[in-house]
């Protein structure tokens, strides 16, 4: 399956609901009335595009109607272009430290898919010809170490882990040392899920990052927050609090294939100014894809 097809499949629920609503609004109103504008606003907000992006799209649509009339305006095309431009402006690929180890810390609340994402990112880098390693720093969830080790075996990626209940900062220390010794390209650090409201757990995460930085100054080079798309705009509070605590560098949005609220990707990047680095579009290792603004926008707002 090609990359665009993966985006299209993964965002099918968002696209189906949104396109159906927009076409219904357009076909029911030969002119752009206050009512049709309200309905269009409700459709975009219902897909969790957020107020900023919604008003931006509505403003461009209204301006185009005033100049061209309905016959010359394709609302899906307008929305596609505005979303692509907004997302491209803040887009950036995963950092790579030339000639050295790039450390990527994966953080987030429980249940967002951090451990699976960590494994899939290792698989992604391996597919690009790089040498990955995983640090199993979630030592508090009973099955986490076992889960990441099974992923490592399945994907043939080395995993540095400690015993259940071990100090995660100590595991991180050993993992960075091993990554440097083995000259890997990427070390993906799987951290424990923690509620953004628990300051003691956030301090522990800060400690893990301090230890990593002592072993390898400048690391972690990326701190990626994993967000579950099905939580919609509720994910925004998580992102704000994590960003305050550990200075995030980007976002990974998972479970997009299971929600009709794919617009939250746009809203959260707009709100926080953080680039979306990857999207989780399914269960398989290949279903984690590097974010592409053009293909993302085209998958939600297809050509009519």
Image (cartoon, helix red, strand yellow):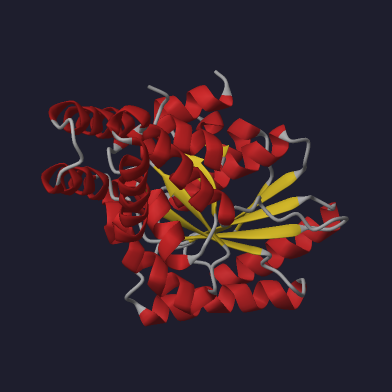
Residue 214, compared with residue 75, is above or below; it is below
Residue at (18, 36) in percent of width and height: 31
Can I make out residue 255 in this image?
yes
The structure residue drawn at horizontal position 50% and vertical position 22%, both measured from the top left corner, is: 5
In-image side of 269 versus 13 (left or right): right
On screen, residue 169 versus residue 232, left or right, reads: right
Toward the viewer: 211 or 164?
211
Give the quadrant of the C terminus: top left
Left or right, 33 with reference to 204: left
Tell me where residue 164 appears, x and y as whole percent: 48, 60
Task: Compare residues 61 and 148 and report the one nearer the observer.
Answer: 61
Q: Is residue 165 left or right of residue 267?
A: right
User: Quadrant of the rendered structure where residue 247 is?
Assistant: bottom right
Looking at the rendering, which quadrant does residue 156 occupy?
Answer: top right
Q: Quick check: can you spot residue 283?
A: no
Residue at image location 33% in from the left, 59% down from the top: 235
- What percent of the width, then of the height, locates residue 65? 31, 41
Farthest front residue in view: 67
In-front residue for pair 248/215: 248
Residue at 70 percent across and 75 percent down: it is: 213
Q: Quadrant of residue 256?
A: top left
Extreme residue toward the top, this view: 1
Q: Position of residue 243 (x, y in %)?
A: 47, 72
Q: Quadrant of the N terminus?
A: top right
């Amino acid at each position: 399956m090609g990359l665009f097809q993966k985006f299209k499949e993964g965002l099918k629920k968002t696209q189906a609901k949104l396109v159906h609503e927009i076409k219904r609004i357009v076909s029911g109103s030969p002119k752009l009335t206050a009512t049709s504008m309200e309905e269009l606003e409700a459709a975009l907000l219902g897909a969790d595009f957020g107020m900023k992006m919604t008003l931006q799209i509505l403003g461009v649509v209204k301006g185009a109607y005033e100049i061209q009339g309905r016959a010359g305006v394709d609302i899906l095309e307008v929305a596609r272009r505005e979303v692509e431009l907004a997302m491209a402006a803040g887009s950036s690929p995963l950092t790579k430290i030339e000639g050295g180890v790039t450390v990527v810390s994966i953080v987030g609340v429980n249940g967002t898919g951090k451990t699976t994402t960590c494994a899939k990112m290792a698989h992604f880098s391996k597919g690009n010809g790089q040498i990955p390693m995983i640090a199993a720093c979630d030592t508090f969830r009973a099955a986490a170490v076992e889960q990441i080790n099974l992923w490592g075996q399945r994907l043939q990626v080395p995993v540095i882990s400690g015993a259940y209940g071990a100090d995660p900062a100590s595991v991180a220390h050993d993992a960075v040392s091993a990554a440097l010794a083995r000259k890997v390209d990427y070390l993906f650090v799987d951290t424990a899920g923690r509620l953004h409201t628990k300051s003691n757990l956030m301090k522990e995460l800060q400690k893990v990052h301090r230890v990593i930085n002592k072993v390898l100054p400048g690391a972690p080079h990326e701190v990626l927050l994993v967000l579950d798309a099905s939580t919609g705009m509720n994910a925004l509070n998580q992102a704000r609090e994590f960003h305050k605590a550990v200075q995030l560098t980007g976002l990974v949005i998972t479970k997009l294939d299971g929600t009709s609220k794919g617009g939250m990707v746009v809203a959260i990047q707009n709100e926080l100014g953080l680039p979306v680095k990857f999207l989780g579009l399914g269960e398989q290792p290949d279903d984690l894809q590097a974010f592409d603004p053009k293909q993302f926008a085209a998958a939600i707002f297809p050509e009519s």
